[in-house]
Image (cartoon, grey):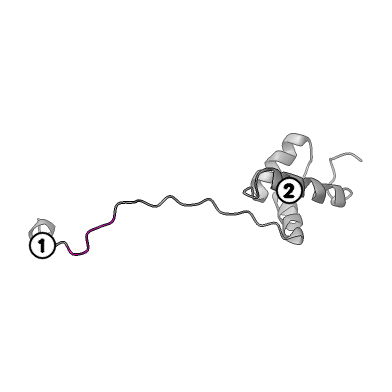
Amino acid sequence: MTPRCAARGGAELAKVVRELFYRHDATYGSPRITQDLWAMGWKVSKNTVAKLMAEQGLVARPKRRRRGLTKADRRACHDFRVSQR
């Protein structure tokens, strides 16, 4: 089977999508997996990959947002003269 048609290779494509998903530690969503598939020679759309991922229950983990460690001093007095300039 040629990797050109996603309709004919649905089961095989689903297997490849699942392998790519777990190879990247479950952090890649459908756009990035689609790019990997294109590099492998598959001709599929982002929506096809999203549908296959949803059917298999594959949901990418969001990147952790970096939070600043500096906390504002809530007890500090606000100087109103500075804001009136």
As drawn, is 31 to the left or to the right of 82? right
- In 3D space, how far apart are the residues under numbered discs 2 and 1 (Cα atoms)? 56 Å
As drawn, is 50 to the left or to the right of 9? left
In this rendering, is residue 65 above or below 23?
A: below
Between 41 and 65, the residue placed more toward the observer is 65
> Label 2 belongs to which residue?
45
Tell me, yes or no, whether the highlighted magenta stretch contains residue 39: no
Q: Secondary structure at mark 1?
A: helix
Specify the principal SS of the magenta part: loop
Q: x, y percentage for residue 75?
A: 18, 64
Q: x, y percentage for residue 30?
A: 67, 50
Q: Secondary structure at mark 2?
A: loop
Q: Which image quadrant: the N terminus? A: top right
Q: Residue at x 34, y 51 (%)?
A: 69
> Label 1 belongs to which residue?
80
Q: Single out the residue that lies furthest toward the right.
A: 1
Q: x, y percentage for residue 45?
A: 73, 48
Q: Residue at x 10, y 62 (%)?
A: 80
Q: Residue at x 70, y 47 (%)?
A: 22
Between 7 and 29, the residue placed more toward the observer is 29
**Magenta span covers which residues?**
71-75
- Which amino acid, mark 1? Phe
